[in-house]
Image (cartoon, grey):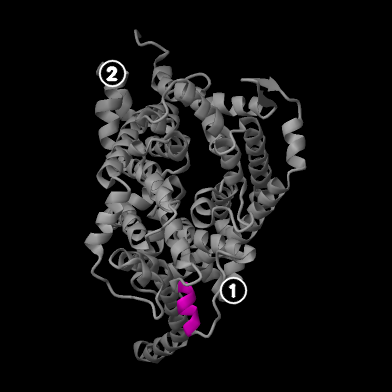
Amino acid sequence: MSRSRLFPYWFLAPALVLFLIFTVYPVVASSILSFQKFEAGAYTFNGLNNYIRLFNDEIFWTALKNTFIIFIFQVPLMLLLAIVLAGALNSQLLKLKGFFRVSFFLPAVTSLVAYSILFSIMLQEEGIINNALSYLGIAAVPWLSDGFWAKASIILAMTWRWTGYNMVIFLAALQNIPEEIYEAASLDGAGKIRQFFHITIPQLKPVILFAGTLSTIGTLQLFDEPFNLTKGGPADSTMTLGLYIYQNGFEYFQFGYASAIAYVVVVLVAILTFIQFKVAGDR
Amino acid sequence: MEAVKSVPITQEKKNRKLPQKIGMYALLGVFLVISIFPFYWMFIGSTNESGKMFSNPPTLLPGTKLVENYQNLNSAIDISRVLFNSLFVSLLYVVSALIVCSLAAYALAKLDFKGKNLIFTAFLLSMMIPYQATLIPLFQMMSSAGWLNTYFAVIAPQICYPFAIFLLRQNFLAFPTELIEAARLDGASELKIFAKVVMPAMRPSLAAASIFLFMTQWNNFLWPLVVLNDSSMHTFPVALSSLMGLSYIDYGQVMMGVSIATIPIIIFFLVLQKQFISGMLGSAVK
C-alpha cells in the first residue's frame, strides 16, 4: 500500500489548527490574563488581586446573584412548559400537530437582538402589554423600571424565545417511547399523571439532561437580552455576568479583571453541569 | 353481535375524552397566541408612527407609514450595506465552516488513527466552554494582527465549530463503510472518495448543517459588536442594537428594522422547516 498512513490527519488539520488558535490558545491566555493587570503599557503579574477584588466588588455579587435568579426560575419553568406542550402535541387526540409545532418553534429562529428590542418596546410602561392588562383590570406593571419586574421581563422574554425549541427536542424523544409501555401501565391501572411521572419523565431523562445542560450554558452566558432589553438596569438589577464581563472588557478596558470574571463563569458551568449529570445521569 | 355492542362503547369513550380535548386545545391556543402575537405586532409597528405603539386602545391594524419608516431607518443606518455585510459574512462562514467541519467529522467517523478519541473528546469538552472565556484574548489577537473591522475577524474564530463537527459526525457514521472500501480498491484517492462518494450522499445533512451555521452567524451579536466599530462594517444585529442607543428613539423606524431582521428568516423557516428543525437540533432529535 502506497497510501500514506497520515492522511486522516490531513482531513483533521484545518479544524485542529483553527481549534488550537481560536479556542485552546484563548482559553489558556485568558486564564493567565486573569492573574495580570495592565500597568505602564505592559501586562504584569498581579497575583490573586483580580480575584480578591472580585470578592469585594458589589456589582460582581449582584451580577452573580441575578444570573442565578434568572437561571433558577427560567430554566425549570421553560423545561416544564416544554414538556407539557410536547406531551400535548404528542397526544393522539390532537389534530393540526404540524401547525402547532411550527408555530411554537417560530420564536427560536428570530435573532436575539431583534426579539429583545421587540420585547423592550412591548414591555414599556405605556406599552401594549400594560394596555392589554388594563382591560383585565390589572394596573400597569413597571416591567422595565423596577428591579423585580425587570428580572421577570428577562425571564419571560427568554421563555418566549426558547420554549418551542426545547419542546421540539422533547417531542422527538417522546415519539421514541414505545406505545406498549403506556398500554401496559394503563392495564395495571396507572392514571395519566402516574404514567407521566413513572414513564414519561424517566424515559425523557437523558434528553432533559441534554436540554438542561444547553440551557445552563446559555443562561450563564446571558448577554444579548439584558444588553438590549434593560441595559442591565434599573440599578444593576438585570446586570448579568456576561454583561459585566463585556463592560469591564470593552467599556473600561480592564482585560485582566474581565478575564477573572469570565473564569468564574467557566467554573460555574463546570460545577452546574457536573451537578446535573450527578442528579439526572445516574440510572 | 360484538360489532353492534362496541359502537356505544367507543362513543362513550369519545365523550369521556371530550373535556380533555377541549382543555388541550385551549392550552395550545393560548400558547399559539403568545408565540405568534409579537410577530404580528412587530409588523403592525413597522407600518405605524411611533406614538401608535403606545396608544390605548392598542393599534392592531396596519397603518400607512411603511415607506416612511423604511426611509427613516435608511437614513439612520445604511440598510443595504448592513444587510450585505450580514449576508456576505454569513455565506462566507457557511462555506468555510462546512468544509472544515465536514472534513474533520468524516475523519472522526470513518477513518482510523492514533489520538482519535482524544481529539473527539477535546472537541466535545470545548462545547462546554463559555464564549466569554475566549472573548478577550481573541479580541487582543484580532487587534494586534490589525484585523479589527474585517469580515475575516467576524468569522475566523468560529469556523471550527465543535457542535457542527459533532452533528456531522453522527450523520457520517451512518454512511456505509463498504462503499468507501470499494472506492479504495478502485484506486480512488482519499480526498476524491470524500468529495465524490461521501459528500454527495450526505447532501440532506449538509443542508441541515448549513442552515444551522447560517442562523448562528446571521444572529451573532456579541463578537461582531466587539470587533466591528466602523459602522460601515456593522452586521444587521449590531446596527439594529445601535438604534436603541440614540437619544431620540423613533419606534416606527426601530420596528421596521426588527421586521427586516425577522421576516426573511421566518419565510425561509416556513419554506424549509424540516431542514431548519433537524439542523438546529441535530442529533438530539435522532
Image coordinates of residue B241 in percent, x first then y, are 42, 49
Image coordinates of residue B262 in percent, x first then y, are 33, 55
Image coordinates of residue B225 in percent, x first then y, are 45, 40
Q: Which residue is mark 1?
A: A193
Q: What chain is tagged by disc 2?
A: B
Residue visible at 25% across and 44% down? B80
CB atoms of marks 1 and 2 within 8 Å? no
Q: Quadrant of residue B99?
A: top left
Q: Identify the secondary structure beneath mark 1.
A: helix
Q: What whole-number distance in Å separates the C-alpha atoms at marks 1 and 2?
A: 58 Å
Residue visible at 38% across and 77% down? B58
Q: Amino acid at mark 1?
A: Ile
Instruction: Choose between B251 and A264: the one closer to the eye.
Output: B251
From the image, give the main secondary structure of the stretch colored magenta.
helix
Residue B246 image label: none
Q: Residues within 10 Å of mark 2 (few under 14, many from 20)?
A: few
Q: Quadrant of residue A96?
A: bottom left
> From the image, which quarter does the N terminus of chain A lie in?
top left
* Left or right, residue A238 beside residue B67: right
Q: Quadrant of residue A14?
A: top left
A121 vs A92: above or below: above
Q: Which residue is mark 2?
A: B185
Q: In the image, is residue A132 part of the stretch drawn in magenta?
A: yes
Q: Amino acid at mark 2?
A: Leu
Instruction: Choose between B173 and B115: the one closer to the eye.
Output: B115
Specify the segment rendered in magenta. A129-135
Q: Residues within 10 Å of mark 1 (few under 14, many from 20)?
A: few
- Residue A166 shows in this picture: yes
Between label 1 and label 2, give the one nearer the viewer. Answer: 1
Residue visible at 55% across and 49% down? A222
